Image (cartoon, rainbow, N blue to C red):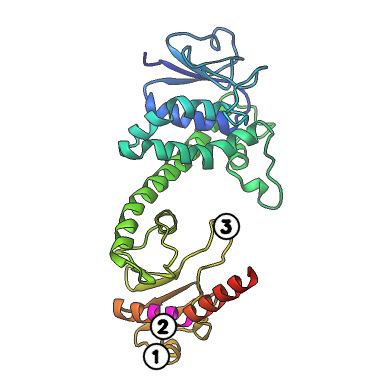
Amino acid sequence: MIPDFLVTHSGGFHADELLSSVVLTRLFPQARIKRSRAPDWITPGADRIIYDVGGAYDGEKRIFDHHQRGAPLRDDGQPYSSFGLIWKHYGRAYLAAAAVPEAHVDAIHASFDASFVLPVDLTDNGALSPSGPLASLTLPSLLETLKPDFDNTDPDAEMAAFHSALAVARTFVEAAIARAAAKLRAETVVRQAIEKTGQARVLELPMGMPFRPAIVKAGADHLLFVVHPRERDWCLTTIRRGDDGFAVRADLPAAWAGLTNGELEAVSGVIGASFCHNGRFVAAAKTREAALAMADLAVAEALPVLEDGLGHAIDAHR
């Protein structure tokens, strides 16, 4: 039954019920958000979905709280917040409503749960406490900065602030889902390009896109560089070794570092070479031919180093 009300608690708001509201208001746009702790409102009924309040979790009765004793846990023992529970029950429907292709729904549901939902769940339950200079810049912290000041006596301030924060939260959820969907679309394009490339060391793509996940999935360990067009020029970029850090499979030539235009052309011998980052992880060229020529030079310089390193690694294990 389609609910008339989406019921969550009154008072100060947090990321979990805001993000739950993002999902539910997309699925049930005609339902009215009711923020209350009154027993009449937080008791399950056919006309409502209750979340982050009510002291119970029962998917069939559509009540999704996590504050009670015996609160629900994930299969791995980690705690849910209301956001995790709402995502578990309504996330796939949300993705379908967001026009995610059916073939991608399960993959995006799982990846979004792991990368976005779970950190919110853990933070809300005190199982994760961000620290350091960026702690105040996490999404839960930023959403809470939108609460009214303690001495704001306007009776409508809490609800107005909640809806302002809800709009911000919606932007982040929709952007994260769109990015996840785009990555899966990119994987198809990159996989096709890898098949076309064969054992060559340079992967050419038709446009800039996320490429590393598809390269890893394909086991294309032989690839060293990627070339693709941009709006006005061509890009030559390295491939990171892992998800974290900046180590790459092969650097661009040291002699190119920080050079542009004529200086880079002179050093590289490639007419049309226009830029190389001082960190040697990305370069640019005016034409496709120039970008591919730079890529070939980068491969030629990198291979002896890589092969020598492999030889040393083999010797070390003998």
Q: CA distance from mark 1 to mark 2?
A: 10 Å
Quadrant in which the N terminus is drawn: top left
Please identify, in this view, whether the residue under mark 1 or under mark 2 is nearer the observer.
2
- Quarter occupied by residue 261: bottom left
Out of 173 and 39, give the one closest to the viewer.
Answer: 173
- x and y, in percent, of residue 36 in the image: 57, 17
Mark toward the start of the polypeptide (1 vs 2)? 1
Q: Are marks 3 and 2 in contact (CB under 8 Å)?
A: no
Q: Is residue 248 above or below residue 117?
A: below
Q: Position of residue 202 (x, y in %)?
A: 37, 71
Highlighted range, magenta:
295-301
Which residue is under mark 1? 269
Q: Quadrant of the C terminus?
A: bottom right
The residue shown at (31%, 67%) is 197
Helix, strand or loop at mark 1: loop
Residue on which disc 2 sits: 297
* Pick the front one: 196 or 313: 313
Badge 1 vs badge 2, beta-carbon distance below 8 Å: yes
Binning the other alpha carbons within 10 Å of mark 1 as few (below 14), some (14 to 19) or many (20 upward) gives some
* Amino acid type, residue under disc 3 in the picture: Asp
- Seen from the viewer's position, the closer of residues 113 and 173 is 113
Is residue 300 one of those drawn in magenta? yes
In this rendering, would 113 be left or right of 206?
Answer: right
Percent x, y of residue 307: 51, 76
Question: Residue 144 lies in magenta, yes or no?
Answer: no
Q: Residue furthest front?
A: 318
Q: Which residue is mark 3?
A: 244
Label 3: element kind = loop
